[in-house]
Amino acid sequence: MDGFFSFLYPLEWVVANIMVGFHWVFTQLGMASDSGWAWSLSIVGLVVTIRILLIPLFVKQIKASRAMQVIAPELKAVQNKYKGKKDQASREAMSRETMELYSKHKTNPFASCLPILVQAPIFFALFRVLNGRIESATEAKPIGLLTAELAAEAHDASIFGAQLSDTFLTSDNAAVKVVSAVLIIAMVATTFLTQRQLTRKNMPASALEGPMAQQQKILMYALPFIFVITGPNFPVGVLIYWTTTNLWTMGQQFYVIRNNPTPGSEAEKALKARREAKARKKGVVIEGTSEDVTAIEEAKEPRQRQQPKKGAPRSQRKKGTPRQSSPSDPADESAGTGDDDAAPDAEKKDDR
């Protein structure tokens, strides 16, 4: 165990320094140095920093998960091909064909677990900082920017009457038990909802059947159950960290599923329905989107037919075709006057 803790020391140093940095920011904003809210928000800041750094791994996780969903029917076909065959040659052939599929699609089942695997050492490092470095005012162990004085303040800091270093099992304080229970419930609920969102909304129908789907379903119920058992042993500060990171994961996943869903999934159908509804709106820019509908408006706007000019030249008119003119045409007025003068002359000729 000493070797494992020695491996965690650099991570402990980083975690402690990030927490102290955010604690300094919040104290500059007017919070008391020994305030439980200042230290709790420092833990939230730690989560935000770590999750921003893990975004590239999250992108790889999404790509790996989609690739696994795409090849699920092919994996099922390979498994059905060697179903019931337990000889060594068949097992080796099935393993070889499975690895060829992974190589062809450039993925593997472990790529989707990268963010969790990377976060695990950070989680243990935070546990060590809260439990090992922040023990009491007299036994506080400095590390990096976390001096003995700051460690003592962090130890005595409390939120809703619960100290950040206390656990549900080791404390007799009712406030600690209530706050811990609420955070454990939130941690379990966010873990379950995140897994359910991933499996129910962002998987095609073909991926909801077979061994892979069964594994996802087991994972959806197993992870929350693990937190129910282990949660009471975590300090309040660690529970704040884990609940915050679960909320970040759920929100990040919701954004990706909504805007870039897996082909063939329910989320993709919902995205297409939203786009069709948006396209049906004529000349309306939908608020909250970046889509430019100017081209749509121009395409849907009817073109006005150019009217022919009146009073074309005589050379362009057919012989015997009367000239069309508007009432405001001076030629028409003069023509009308001439007709009126000619009428009395005709009557005189008839009288003669």
Image (tube, helix red, strand yellow):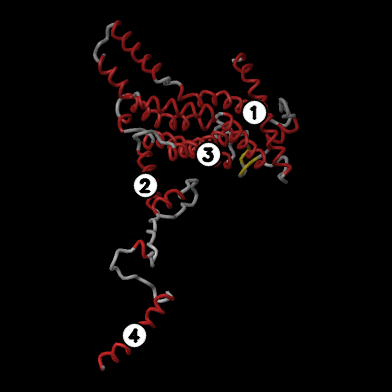
Residue shown at the point (61%, 25%) measured from the top left: 125
Task: Tell me which corner region of the image, top left, top right, bottom left or bottom right, holds residue 43.
Answer: top right
Q: Amino acid at mark 2?
A: Glu
Q: CA distance from mark 1 to mark 3?
A: 21 Å
First in residue order: circle 1 vs circle 3: 1
Q: Secondary structure at mark 4?
A: helix
Q: Is residue 302 above or below residue 25?
A: below
Confirm or deny contact between disc 3 and disc 4 (CB under 8 A): no
Crowding at label 4, few (<14), some or many (≥20) Cα neighbours within 10 Å? Answer: few
First in residue order: circle 2 vs circle 3: 3
Dot 2 corresponds to which residue? 276
Which residue occupies the extreme bottom position in the image?
Answer: 351
First in residue order: circle 4 vs circle 1: 1
Dot 1 corresponds to which residue? 15
Q: Amino acid at mark 4?
A: Ala
Question: Which disc is residue 342 wearing?
Answer: 4
The picture places residue 246, in percent across and down from the top left corner, at: 51, 35
